[in-house]
């Protein structure tokens, strides 16, 4: 889905997500976070726990660390011209006094039903912490 259309996806959401205000918030969020962090509008932002590096920019969209295919030079096995997103996340997290330890948090898999919605609204409403049907809740997993 293109970046311009990601904010539009909020229109298909339920409740507040279906409102014009929610679509506007999603657009503003993408305008701010897209250029700064490469935000992919997953609807479940974890920038604070990944050294202000969006894990969704990983070609494999891994949210809990590198795939094991990191090249000796620190570059991605899928896109050799790109530095491993998780290597950048680890290095950056070391420089964040407030969130330094959060890089080790275990994050749940992405809930693809939230794609294109505002993570700000999802955080406030608790929607980003709801366990989708078929998933098991785990007390050790931090959203």
Image (spheres, helix red, strand yellow):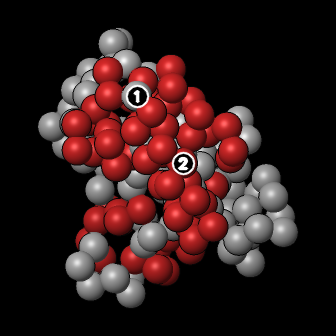
In this picture, is 92 found above or below 22?
Answer: below
The secondary element bearing badge 2 is classed as helix
Horizontal side of 24 relative to 134 (left or right) equals: right
Question: Who is closer to the viewer here, 52 or 24?
Answer: 24
Q: At which x and y percent is residue 87? A: 56, 71
Residue 27's tag is: 2
Q: Residue 24, relative to residue 10: is it above or below? A: below
Structural crowding at the residue carrying mark 1, measured as other residues with C-alpha within 10 Å and reported as few (<14), some (14–19) or many (≥20): some
List x then y, in percent, for residue 28.
50, 55
For mark 1, what is the residue? 19
The answer to whether residue 31 of the structure is visible from this angle is yes
Q: Residue at x 81, y 58 (%)?
A: 79
The reply to whether dot 1 and dot 2 touch (C-beta < 8 Å) is no
Q: CA distance from mark 1 to mark 2?
A: 13 Å
Which sits in the foreground, 16 or 99? 16
Name which quarter of the figure residue 103 lies in: bottom left
Q: Is residue 103 above or below residue 142?
A: below
Depth check, front residue: 17 or 43: 17
Instruction: Name the outermost residue toward the top.
Output: 134
53 or 140: nearer the viewer: 53
Percent across and percent down for residue 15 are 32, 21
Image quadrant for the N terminus? top right
């Amino acid at each position: 889905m293109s970046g311009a259309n990601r904010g539009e996806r909020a229109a298909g959401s339920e409740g507040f997500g279906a409102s014009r205000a929610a679509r506007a918030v999603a657009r503003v969020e993408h305008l701010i976070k897209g250029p700064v962090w490469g935000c992919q509008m997953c609807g479940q932002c974890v920038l604070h726990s990944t050294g202000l590096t969006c894990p969704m920019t990983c070609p494999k969209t891994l949210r809990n660390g590198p795939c094991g295919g990191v090249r000796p030079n620190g570059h991605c096995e899928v896109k050799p011209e790109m530095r491993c997103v998780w290597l950048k996340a680890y290095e950056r997290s070391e420089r964040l006094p407030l969130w330094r330890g959060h890089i080790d948090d275990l994050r749940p898999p992405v809930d693809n039903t939230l794609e294109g919605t505002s993570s700000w609204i999802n955080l406030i409403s608790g929607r980003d912490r709801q366990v989708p049907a078929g998933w098991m809740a785990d007390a050790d997993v931090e959203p």
